[in-house]
Amino acid sequence: MGCFAKYAICYNLSMSEIKCPKCGTTFKVDDSSYADILSQVRGAEFENELHKRLEQEKKQAKSESALESAKLTAEIEKLKTKLGNAETEKQLAITEVKASLEKQFETLSSELKEKAIKDLNEEKSKNAVEIEKLKNQIKNVETEKQLAVANAIAPLEKERDKLAGDLKLREEKAKLDTVSIEDRYKGALKLKDEEIERLKDMKAKLSTKMVGETLEQHCQTEFNRIRMTAFPKAYFEKDNDARTGSKGDFIFRECDEAGNEIISIMFEMKNENETTATKHKNEDFFKELDKDRKEKKCEYAVLVSMLEADDEYYNTGIVDVSYRFEKMYVIRPQFFIPIITLLRNAALNSLKYKAELAVVRDQNIDITNFENDMNEWKAGWLNTMKNAGKKHLEAIEQINKAIKDLEKTRDALMLSDKHLASAEGKLDDLTIKKLTRGNPTMKAKFDELDKA
């Protein structure tokens, strides 16, 4: 197991396994163990990066130290050159003074010669003091150079010691982590073996138990045992509604205080005796269970099965078969309560959104009803207006007809007036003379009347 600290680790998310590239051994681990191993690998990468960084810092320190040393050396050379030039100038000045003095000595008296020598010695002492000052400056520069180099190297050495200490601590921690991981995996393997034995024993006991006590009764008993503590307001009863031609075994349904459904599950329990000749498979019941779920308006479908007892795929725990049928799971009886708890807790997290969705749905229903009422009123109003329009048109037609009849009556009356006027004119023109014209008998009669 120690090779996990030195080599890359392959991690299979779907199988929860790791494989050592060196020895080829495969181990099943959980996410926390994988995180520990991954941190160990990252720790090794960090140590390599730390070594590289330390080497870079050392090279950079050497480069900076060499550069600083070169600068100090150049300054020293400049001072030496300056000192040499001063020394040369001094010697030249002394030589010139000596030559001048020698010429003067020849003409000066002995007293003057002594004075000149004394002055010359004083000048020489001054030059000696100047030379001593320049030597002290050179010495100070050398000291400053050494101090600068020491100051530049000290933090780097301190950082180097610190990194070396950290590296040593990490190496020791890596060793301890390796031992811890090995112990953890040994413990995990031991627990796995114990769990396998426990599950085998439980399966044997359950198989024996389910023959005498049906699987449905077992699940109902398990639920009723914790109903009042875990699910006090939940509905869990047998599905007795076979109006659609089929039914499940149990329906679990839970709602909040406002009546919004939190979760609903259609359960189907399947078991068979070990001596049964015809063995069924779990997938034989998927289609019918999905049909029952949809007809009874349940959100999830769960098959509690003792079928295919030797199939490790169904023995590992809660099996999600949503790739075949939506929101469907297959479990062994020992996972009956856990599957309800898991699905219920997940549904509680989304309860707020379901409540908001219900409010929006109710609002949409109210809006739809309002729109339907408004459309119905509008349709009635339009129908009334249509009927009124028809009556209005009929009234206008009747009025037009009456106007036409009145116009005819008016024309007839006007014509009658013309006839009456004509008759009146004729009556006015009517005289005895006109009446008796051409009628001698009547003329004679009227003449007799006139005479009488």
Image (cartoon, grey):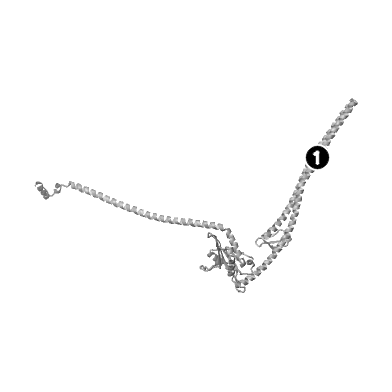
Residue 91, placed above or below residue 267 = above
Quarter residue 336 falls in: bottom right
Please name whichever residue, 376 or 429, is drawn nearer the observer in this view of the structure.
376
**Quarter of the image with the N terminus in it:** bottom right
Q: Residue at x 66, y 68 (%)?
A: 198
Residue under label 1, please give it. Answer: 140
Residue 91, placed above or below residue 339 = above
> Is 134 on the left or on the right of 22, as rendered?
right
Mark yes or no: residue 321 visible.
no
Quarter residue 170 falls in: bottom right
> Is 444 on the left or on the right of 303, as rendered?
left
Q: Position of residue 364 (x, y in %)?
A: 50, 56
Please name whichever residue, 450 or 145, is drawn nearer the observer in this view of the structure.
145
| Residue most extreme to the right | 110
Query: What secondary structure is marked by label 1?
Result: helix
Residue type at mark 1 is Asn
Residue 67, placed above or below residue 399 = above
Residue 83, placed above or below residue 308 = above
Q: Position of residue 345 (x, y in %)?
A: 59, 60
- Within 10 Å of disc 1 (Cα), the crowding (few <14, some 14-19, many 20+) is few
Q: Position of residue 387 (x, y in %)?
A: 38, 55
Mark yes or no: residue 337 visible.
yes
| Residue most extreme to the left | 452
Q: Residue at x 77, y 46 (%)?
A: 154
